Image: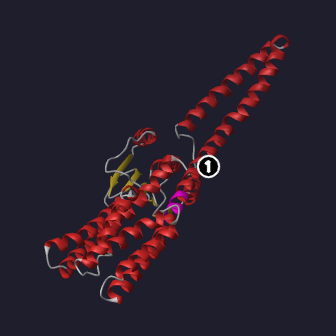
Amino acid sequence: MTARSLRITATTQGRLRRLNLLTATPPLVVTAALLSVKDTDGWWQIAILASGMVAALVAFERWTANDLGRVFWPCLAVAIIVWPLSVMLTDSGNGYWGICVVGSLGIPRLRRHTRTVIAGLLVYIAAVGLLGDGLVKYLLIPVGITAIAIGSSFLGERFYAVVEELEQSKAREAELAVIRERVRFAGDLHDIQGHTLHVVKLKTTLARKLVRSDPARAEEELREIHALVSDTITQTKELAYAQRRLNLNAELENAKNLFEAAGIRVRISRDGDPGRGELFGQVLRETTTNILRHAQASQVRITLSAQGITIVNDGATGDTVPELRGLSALRQKVAGDGGELLVSVSNGEFTTAARFGVFSAAAESGR
């Protein structure tokens, strides 16, 4: 796994855990307040139950930050102390909530002795519950709910593990797609230079043999070598700056294959033939490479119209447009032909649009 892959996985898991924090904290706080008021007669009794609830909330907040390990044992110790105090001093059967929450969050992450800790915790809850006046209230309900909570947490951790596996798989596919693009570039470079170098070698050998016996023919061979090398240099520059003649339909098919290989959904819409297939093919190729290398996209929309091409992806990581780099050269080329290349970021979407004509509201509807 690369650093980028790990970063993407951590970001996704962090969003899910923060969502859990936002959705689960209010009910936990309200429940804690109601139980404390219901089962207590004085501030000191409220303080006992509140201590367990605070330990549970601290553990839950650290769990959402993926940092439960630092506070698990202290929070569990507080919760363990609160349970017998709530039974014997406040006559409350709800003091086990701290143990239930902290234990269910931390136990699935233990590397060793997991079953022993589960059994010990349930036996402890049951043993303390026997001190209370009521088998159901102090024993069956606390032990049953805690066991269910721990089991549910194991399922939840498995869910996060599946999310991690999916994110890692997606990141690997994206990396492979970039590698395929590099291999394709290397193939294009080989097509340009491989044949040329072989021909140059043969002509150089021939010129060496003719330099004394037929100087005129040798000079002609040298002129051809010079022209061939010059042409190869031009083609190599065009390839390096994405200016080599391209076929738009072929680039569309290639982009679709690359995105799908990277686990990115792609939708291609044709509202007309834009013409200038070579220029728009260059824009599409450069944009495809940028998305695969720099974005965290899950879907891409490519729209062709009579005016041009628009590529939209949902992988924008900020609200500002980054440095164009490869697209900057294409922007000048498009402008030189009387068109315009625009890039923008809005609502988490990055849009690249090359048009010839007015950028009307209808033309921008694909964003």
Q: Quadrant of residue 329?
A: top left
Q: Where does label 1 land, which residue?
A: 180
Residue shown at 33% from the left, 82% from the top: 131
Q: Magenta region: which residues? A: 163-168
| Tag 1: amino acid | Arg
- What element does badge 1 sit on? helix
User: Where residue 68 appears, x then y in whole percent?
Assistant: 39, 59
- In the shown orientation, is residue 168 left or right of residue 37? right
Q: How many marks?
A: 1
- In the shown orientation, is residue 242 left or right of residue 13? right
Q: Is residue 136 magenta?
A: no
Residue shown at 33% from the left, 76% from the top: 96
What is the magenta segment's predominant secondary structure? helix
Residue shown at 70% from the left, 21% from the top: 223
The quadrant of the picture occupied by the C terminus is bottom left
Residue in front for this viewpoint, 62 or 272: 62
User: Where residue 309 appears, x then y in whole percent?
Assistant: 44, 55
- Which residue occupies the extreme left position in the image? 42
- In the shown orientation, is residue 39 left or right of residue 180? left
Q: Is residue 165 magenta?
A: yes
Residue 264: tell me if it is visible: no
User: Where residue 40 appears, x then y in whole percent?
Assistant: 18, 79
